[in-house]
Image (cartoon, rainbow, N blue to C red):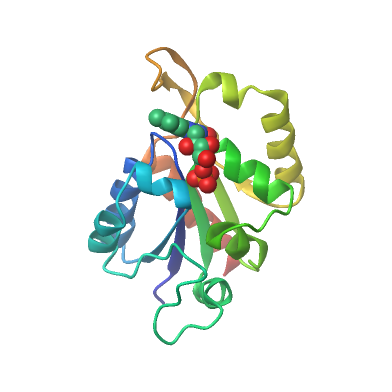
Amino acid sequence: MEKNILLGVTGSIASYKACDLVGMFRKKGFTVRCVMTRDAKWFVTPLALETLSGQTVYRDMFKLPEKRDTVHISLVEEADVILVAPATADIIGKVASGICDELLTCTICAADCPVIFAPAMNDKMYTNPIVQDKIEYLKGKGYHFIDPVEGHLACGRSGIGHIAPLEKIIDKTEKVLSARI
Ligand SMILES: Cc1cc2nc3c(=O)[nH]c(=O)nc-3n(C[C@H](O)[C@H](O)[C@H](O)COP(=O)(O)O)c2cc1C
């Protein structure tokens, strides 16, 4: 049966990689619905994600698309897995703190399917003890993480925080999905 991936896209310099992920998942036969945070728009356009996914891109809880009343609940009901890629320090901190201030945070809070985060951020952010504490806290609550790798960072340096290779993200998502069957 066709599986539905809800792809959360956040405001990271790595957000453009979400476009590649959408294409790669679709090639494998998945349906991908994207939810963008408010700040994701600075890095990737809704039009690009909509075109690549062939689905409406969701961004605003208060501007309802046709036939959907509580969009965060409808999205959760349709999703087999939620993948947040890239995941900012901000989204990780918000989810760990139970903050529900926009569509993606509300959707994750309401999720009864597995949720996977693929963090991407500067090494100074990633190694911040508060960020690490939030990651450990979420892991303890059953959230999945695909750890970032050492690599070239937007600031020009190399360090830990580069989003994991997309193949690894896809592989982990498939494993999480199959463990659920
Ligand atoms: C050029 C630029 C690049 C950024 N890249 C990242 C990033 O890779 N990871 C991250 O956690 N935050 C990054 N930020 C900060 C986030 O965009 C900021 O925390 C934002 O509020 C995140 O919102 P969101 O989590 O709701 O998408 C970046 C900011 C700028 C200006």
Q: Is residue 145 above or below residue 153?
A: below
Left or right placement of residue 130 versus residue 59 in this view = right
Residue 48: horizontal and vertical position, in percent?
A: 25, 55
**Percent position of residue 81, x then y:** 53, 63
x 47%, y 65%: residue? 60
Residue lying farthest top? 157
Indicate the quadrant containing the N terminus: top left, top right, bottom left or bottom right.
bottom left
Q: For the point 66% across and 67% down, which residue is it? A: 110
- Can you see residue 174? yes
Any part of residue 119 in sight: no
The answer to whether residue 169 is above or below residue 175 is above
Locate residue 39 relative to residue 117 in the image: left or right. left
Viewport quadrant of the C terminus? bottom right
Whole-percent x, y for residue 172 in the image: 50, 48
Residue at image position (66%, 58%) is: 100
Residue appearing at x 63%, y 66% in the figure: 111
Which residue is at the far front? 62
Measured as percent of width and height from the top left, residue 135 is found at 68, 38
- Which corner quadrant of the image does residue 77 belong to? bottom right
Question: How many numbered callouts?
Answer: 0
Please state which of residues 119 and 164 is positioned toward the viewer in this rendering: 119
Q: Nearer the viewer, residue 80 or 180?
A: 80
